[in-house]
Each structure stands twice: as structure tokens, then as C-alpha cells.
Amino acid sequence: MSLDSQALALAEQVSAAAATNTPVAIQGSGSKAFYGRHTGDALQALDMTAYQGIVSYEPTELVVTAAAGTPLEILDASLAEGGQYLGFEPPRFGPGATVGGTVACGLAGPSRPYTGSVRDFILGVKMINGKGEILRFGGQVIKNVAGYDISRLMAGSLGTLGIILEISLRLLPRPAVHRTLVHNAAETTAIERIAQWARYPYPLSGAVCDGERLYIRLSGSASGVAAAADAIGGDTLDATEAQTFWEDLREQRLEFFAGDAPLWRLSLPPATAPLNLPGEWLLDWGGAQRWLRSTADPYTIFDAAKAAGGHASVFRGGDRSSTVFQPLDPPLLALHQRLKSGFDPAGIFNPGRFYPDW
Amino acid sequence: MALDTDHAAVADAPPGVSLTELRDALQRGLPASYILTEAEQLRPYECDGLSAYRQIPRAVVLPDSIEQIQHVLRVCHKLRVPVVARGAGTSLSGGSLPHAEGVLLSLSKFNKIIAVDPENRCARVQPGVRNLAISEAVAPYGLYYAPDPSSQIACSIGGNVAENAGGVHCLKYGLTVHNIISVDMLTMEGEQLTLGSGGLDGPGYDLLALLNGSEGMLGVIVDITVKLLPKPVVAQVVMAAFDRVDQGGQAVADIIASGIIPGGLEMMDNGIIRAAEDFVHAGYPVEAEAILLCELDGTAAEVAEQVAQVRTVLEQAGATEIRTSRDDQERALFWAGRKAAFPAVGRISPDYYCMDGTIPRRELGKVLNQIQELSRQYGLGVVNVFHAGDGNLHPLIMYDANQPGQLEQAEALGGAILELCIQVGGTITGEHGVGVEKINQMCVQFNTPELEQFHALKAAFDEYGLLNPGKAIPTLARCAEFGAMHVHGGQLPFPELERF
Ligand SMILES: Cc1cc2nc3c(=O)[nH]c(=O)nc-3n(C[C@H](O)[C@H](O)[C@H](O)COP(=O)(O)OP(=O)(O)OC[C@H]3O[C@@H](n4cnc5c(N)ncnc54)[C@H](O)[C@@H]3O)c2cc1C
Ligand SMILES: Cc1cc2nc3c(=O)[nH]c(=O)nc-3n(C[C@H](O)[C@H](O)[C@H](O)COP(=O)(O)OP(=O)(O)OC[C@H]3O[C@@H](n4cnc5c(N)ncnc54)[C@H](O)[C@@H]3O)c2cc1C
């Protein structure tokens, strides 16, 4: 079936579900089924994996348009042929990870502070809203301010606003070289050094500290990387070892991520001094994303993150039927609910997956 | 040009609130001197950068605290009076054009840089701060705020967020939306919301992304934290001249294809080259049909490497002349003409009308040729200066408002150019916003369910449609009247779906 007729079939399914108030779970490959809330309700599944394929890709435009069910692996391979890549370095968390699920979850890898987040690369979407209408917003051009930016709003909305059918993403040219430097540094020193280096235009593409070692990744032209490496110093990690390290970090395969304690993600101003919360820490994104394995009371962590100017979420484990994302203040919560009903009046898309309230 | 009022009507408007009633209510939370209601006081606010549209508001308010803005919003919400926020009033789409029944909310007193945080590379500023003032204030830390609209000495950061403004350096460093960390906004009810956080993202939906480019329709921006970047060590501009415009267009694609993202990549056609050269004497080759300005920045070694690469690409693309700036002074000179392009055209034409369509880069040559064709057809000159790397065109239509019919002709030509942009898969506005100006072309770019979705989104923020009514998103009635057929990339997708 062509993408167009599949889209129409999906739209009909949605209209029917809306007419009978039947909630649906939009499913990619299930690679990120661990993420978000689990309500325990058995929902009608809406499988997106067949809706796949690269709709258009022209390297000189630095733009790709792909159907939501396209596996990241396939997309990556095509982009590599054009000498380009997805600048937000998305984690897979499983072999079949789809581009739709990636955008819906809004997750980005180690290069995020330096290259941008998922939404930073979004140029346009084709989607189905809760009324079963097929809509397009944004487009394939780099700059576009016609109408509200609904395409970027889809990033991280966990499939609660609509079904993403197609997505247009801006691309980056693949850097010529990468180099990883290692310093012995505990958290406080690492945070200080990162803040210092970030004030120079070094081609940074990763900065992570496991409490003992600080890993710095540089990506760019040979001369730019060499000059920055001279200035920053430290031991150069063997190229293969370095690649494995950054992939294992992105895919949460490092030893730190093994274990049963709930895995928290704290999003903070990067130079925030280490927070006084019980558990094990891993600093990523130059300090702006901090992983915490902790059994502390969830609200202790939510409150601490907020007090530090950021927010927190239970990324894996813990009580997933409870609140897993930072609670919203009442006026902001009310706005979210109104917005949700503006897209999905019958409330059928992934109910409860994001927040308990909708 | 009179703004027709049917599409500017406010839902549920209560029957006539008198000016006295409105002023009295405002005065309960605002010093009398902060409320302007006399005709001669209102006159300076009657238009923004698109001066063809003029409208006197009922009142102008000049609050100096968030509490005062909250008071204004609560009063207007209760009395169902429209509110139009205004930063510096440099909008080129009539975005800050007042509403006849409404209050114009000037943010000019919110001009303070609240804090600079070099450790976290950010600055907290009030919405009325001028774009350039931020980079000036953080320069001592070796940092700057990247988005640099040509209007940067005048435009406000609040207006930049509301329009998702771009600039010469946005190809590499992103638009406003990519450079804002968090925003505090007030809803029409006067409720304060923080969007984003001190981290790189915020909880819930990405409302911060949504607010960028929302043209003052969703909330009033009262506090902004911007991202700062380290200043490049070295920057050099390569200037290349071409005998044909499409060769220049091809060179743009070739540079991008070679794996380089320049700091800026701008193009000017012969009309602009001559006008700018006459004005600033930058030493541009006035015989050239097109020149490209390609800025490369980074460390010294990187820039040297990329300059060599770009020169090779330009030679292969058929450049007739290639010059590289030797120092910052010459670099500034190369840019001077580009930055002064608008006033330069102001010297050769009594009036000009600036368009803002964006197209896929591969269509550059074709679209530029068709614009020349349209220019002949409509009998008005068009010169082109644009953000070539982004595919964002700024055709300047030259006309004389004192000649009867020329303004209407310029508008019609502008509309035709925008529809051409949509046909090749582009958009009617890359950075200047829809405002009142491009409201009809919105009917061409979006179909009925899409427009309805925009209205539903707006209603979630502003139930009664009091914020900047009549801008950005046309009503369905207006589109039916305009009678445009919605086109996507030259084809009508899903012809079986319902349309007006
Ligand atoms: C123990 C357990 C309990 C669960 N309980 C629930 C439950 O109560 N409620 C519930 O909703 N789910 C629940 N799930 C998850 C559910 O089974 C599906 O896996 C999920 O809803 C579909 O996303 P995914 O993980 O398969 O897709 P992924 O590809 O991993 O995508 C992740 C996210 O993106 C969204 N998404 C994917 N493709 C698109 C698209 N094209 N457009 C828009 N959004 C898209 C998905 O809905 C999901 O939110 C549970 C999972 C487990 C393991
Ligand atoms: C010579 C010239 C060159 C220009 N060059 C560029 C360019 O290179 N790139 C570019 O992108 N633009 C350019 N512009 C257009 C204009 O400068 C930008 O759109 C700018 O962002 C507008 O800022 P402002 O403060 O003047 O906003 P205003 O004109 O006052 O308002 C613009 C819109 O923003 C809303 N608004 C303003 N402040 C707030 C607030 N605090 N809260 C909510 N809404 C608000 C208004 O309601 C209105 O809808 C140019 C304009 C001129 C005159």
C-alpha cells in the first residue's frame, strides 16, 4: 500500500476511534515502551511500523523527509551515503527504533548541547490529529514562520497530540574527524573545566563525567580539532574505544546504567554545583543532563531539580503508574490540558502516557 | 491600505466599553502618565516597519513592571478589549499594527539586562532590550548572542522571539528559537508561566518552541533567558562575482554539498549591487549579475582550510572574480553593502516593499528568473538580496506610493511572488512573519483543517481571541472570500479530502 493510502486508512481508524471514544496506543517498534507512564489500561494498538520509507532526500538541501515508521538504522545508512547525519545523535534503545518514536520521545544523544535537540532539527511534519484529519505544518525549508510552529511542538509530546506520519529534518554534514580526550577529574572540577572550555569556540561534541574521569569529545575539521585538543590537553582515547564509549553512553549500556534503582534524568543549568541527593551520578551534556540512580522519594528529587532551575523525570524503573515527569504548576498544567483537547478533543491518543491528567 | 475589520473582530465582544471606562480601569493599576489616549500621543504608534498599514489604537499603555502588565491584561480580559504587544515596532509584516478597538501595550520600558551568567553562557533580559545591546553587554566575557537581524540596532528581543527572527549568521548558529533558553510569558488572563527551564529543555510540551514565531498571539513575553556563544577567533569573508544569477545559486548548493556550513552565505543581484555600491562604496563589482558573500569563522587553522575549499568550489562554479577579506576592517566593508541594502534601495526608489519567501535552495536560479519575469509583467522593478544559504529570499519591489495604483500593483506582484514560493515547495515567510500583510497567502499555504487546528491552538491560550486579533492566521471566512486554492509543492495532496 502506498504511503498516501496508508495515511488515509490510519486517519479513518482515528476518526472511528474518536467517534467511539476508544483510546489508542500509537506504536513504533516498542523500543521505548519503558519510557513514559504505564497506566495498565489495555489500549487498542495503532501500529506505525509499516508506514515507512524515505520520502525525499537531497544532500545539497541538508534536509530529509521520512515516514514515521522508518527505522533509524535505515535512515542513518542513507544519510551516511550523502555524508550527513542527524545532528541530535538520537539514542535507539533497541534495534527497530523508528524516526517517529524518536521524535515523539524527543530524546537526543551526547552532542545535544553543541549541535541541538530533536526539535531544533525539525522543519515540518505531516500528522493526523484527534479528529482524523491529515495536516501538514512547517515544510522542507530551513526558515519558516508561517503559522504556529506545530511541527516542533510534536517533539517530546509522546504521541499525545497526534500521529506523526512524516517528518522533515534538517541535517548536518558529517564531521571529518573526532577525537576523545580523558582527564582525571571529579564532578566539581569537571563542571568548572567544562564551563571554561565552553567559553572558547572549540568544536566540542560531548562532555561527560563519571565522577572520576572527564571525557571530552571534539568533532570537526582536522585542523580545528587538533588546535582544540592542544588547548584542552589530556589523554587521547583510542578511536575504536572512543566510539564504543560514546555509543554505550548514548544507548545506556555503560556499567552505570545497569542495576535496579530507578534511573532519573535531571535537566539543569550546566554549571550547577553537584546536588545533594542520595545515589550515583553520571554527568552528561557538559552538566546539563545528569543521570541519577536513586531510590529517594520522587518528590525530593522533583523539588531539588526545580529549586536548581531545572526539572527531573524518572527515565527508567520506579513506579511507572505514578508521576514520572516533573509535575507542572497549576496554570501550566491547565494550559497543557486545553492544548491537548485542541488537538485531540476525544482524548484518544496515548492517554496517561505523559501525565496522569490527560 | 485599510485593514478590513471583519477578520479582526473579537469573539464575544461585549457591547461598547467606553474609553472613559477603559481608562479608569487601567488607571487603577497604572500611573495616569503611563496611559496615552490623545490623538497626537497615539500617532507615533499607528504603524510599524510596514508603514503602508496604519491604525490608531484606542489607547497606548507604557507599563514598567510585570504587575502593571498583568493589570492591563486583566482589565482588557474582563472588558474584552484587544491587546497588541509592541516591542520596537520594526516588524515588516504589520505584526505590531494597533487594533482600532484595542490597547497597544508598549514594552519599551522593559529595557534592562537583568543578569549575565558566563558560567552557564546565558543572559536574562527584559523583553524590550535591543538585540544588539545583548551582544554589547556580554562582549567583555568573550560571548555574544548569535541571531543578528539586520534591524538589530533597533529591534527588541521580545519582538525577535515573537517573530522567530533570523539574521545573516542563522545558517550556522540557528534562528531565535535555537538561541532562547527560557521565557516567562503572561497569558491574556494575566497569569505568569515559565516556558523552558534553566536546563536545555523544560517539562511538558515544548511550549517554548511554540511561542517563538507566534506573533504576539499567544501571550505577552516578559522575561527572556538567551543562550550566549563564544565569539569566533577569526572570521573571513569570501566575495565572489558571477555573470549569471543561476550560477550564483548553483555555487550556494555546491558550498553546502562540500560539507561546509558557512557562518553566513548571502547573495545580492545586480540591482542591489549597484544601489549598495553607490551608497556605501564597498568596492563591489558593479558589472556582476550576482555576488555571493560567504563568511567562514572558527579557529585560525579551520578558517584558512575552509577559505581554500570555498575558493575552489567558487572557481568551479564559474565565479568571474573572487576576493577574500584581509582583515576585520575589510570584512566589515564587504558586509556594509549587504547590511545597508534596504536603505540603499530607499535611495533609488521612493518606496519599496520587502518580501520574505523561502524556497528550497535548488530552486534559487529558477525562482529568481521567474521573479524577473513577474517584474516585467507587473511593470515594477524588483531587486533581490537574500539569505542564500537558507533559501530565504528578500525581493524588494520598487514602487511610488504617490502614483495612483502603484501600491496595489506592488501588493499584487508581492502576492504572485509568494505564491511562486509555495509552488516550488517553499513558504510565504521565512522570518518576517505573517502579520496582516501575508494573511491572504496563508489561505494558499494551509487548508481548512490546518487553519482550524491553528485556531484551536490559539483558543487554548487565548479563549476570546483578544491578543493581536486579525493577525497571523486568517479566519475561514476570509479565506473563502479571498478564494485561494491551497497548494502544496505544486500539487493538491489528498484531493478527496474536504476543502472550502
Ligand atoms: C509493562 C508495560 C506497560 C505499558 N503500559 C502502557 C499503558 O498503560 N499505556 C500506554 O499508552 N502504553 C503502555 N505501554 C507502552 C505500549 O505498550 C506501547 O509500547 C507504546 O504505547 C507505543 O510506543 P512504542 O514504545 O512501541 O514506540 P516507540 O517506537 O518506542 O515510540 C515511543 C513513543 O513514541 C510514540 N510514537 C511512536 N510512533 C509515533 C508516531 N508515528 N506518531 C506519534 N507518536 C509516535 C509512541 O506512542 C511512544 O509514546 C506499556 C509498556 C510496557 C512494557
Ligand atoms: C530595516 C529592517 C531590517 C530587518 N531585518 C530583519 C532581518 O534580517 N531578519 C528578521 O528576522 N527580521 C528583520 N526585520 C524585521 C523586524 O526587525 C523583526 O521582525 C523583529 O523581530 C521585530 O522586533 P520588534 O521589537 O521591532 O517587534 P515589533 O515590531 O514591535 O513587534 C513584532 C511582533 O512581535 C510582537 N511582540 C513584540 N514584543 C512582544 C512581547 N514582548 N510579547 C509578545 N509579543 C511581542 C508584536 O505583537 C508583533 O506581532 C527587519 C526590519 C527592518 C525595519
Image (cartoon, coloured by chain):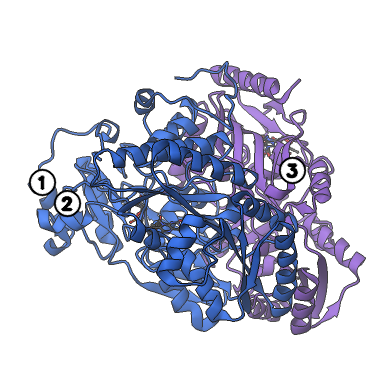
Write the residue at 63% across / 54% down. Answer: B248
- Left or right of residue B345: residue A313: right
Residue labelled 1 has its Cβ within 8 Å of some atom of ligand 2: no
Mark 2 neighbour class, 10 Å CA radius: few under 14, some 14 to 19, many 20 or more: many
**Which callout, 3 or 2, points to the residue nearer the camera?**
2
Q: Which chain is blue?
A: B
**Mark 1 residue element:** helix
| Chain on which label 3 sits | A
- Left or right of residue A318: residue B201: left
Name the amino acid type tagged 1. Answer: Leu
Q: Earlier in the sequence, mark 2 or mark 1?
A: 1
Q: Which chain is purple?
A: A
- Left or right of residue B268: residue B257: right
Give the labeled residue for mark 1: B19
Residue labelled 3 has its Cβ within 8 Å of some atom of ligand 1: yes
Image quadrant in which the C terminus of chain B is located: top left
Q: Residue A258: in sight, yes or no?
A: yes
- Measured as percent of width and height from the top left, residue B354 is found at 40, 50
Give the labeled residue for mark 2: B59
Give the labeled residue for mark 3: A32
**Mark 2 residue element:** strand
The reply to whether dot 1 and dot 3 touch (C-beta < 8 Å) is no
Write the residue at 48% across / 20% down. Answer: B499
Write the residue at 62% across / 80% down. Answer: B326
Quarter of the render that holds ligand 2: bottom left
| Chain on which label 1 sits | B
Q: Which numbered tag is attached to residue A77?
A: none
Rounded to the nearest angstrom, the CA distance separating label 3 from label 2 is: 53 Å
Are tags 2 and 1 found on a single chain? yes
| Chain on which label 2 sits | B
- Left or right of residue B254: residue B103: left
Name the amino acid type tagged 2. Answer: Ala
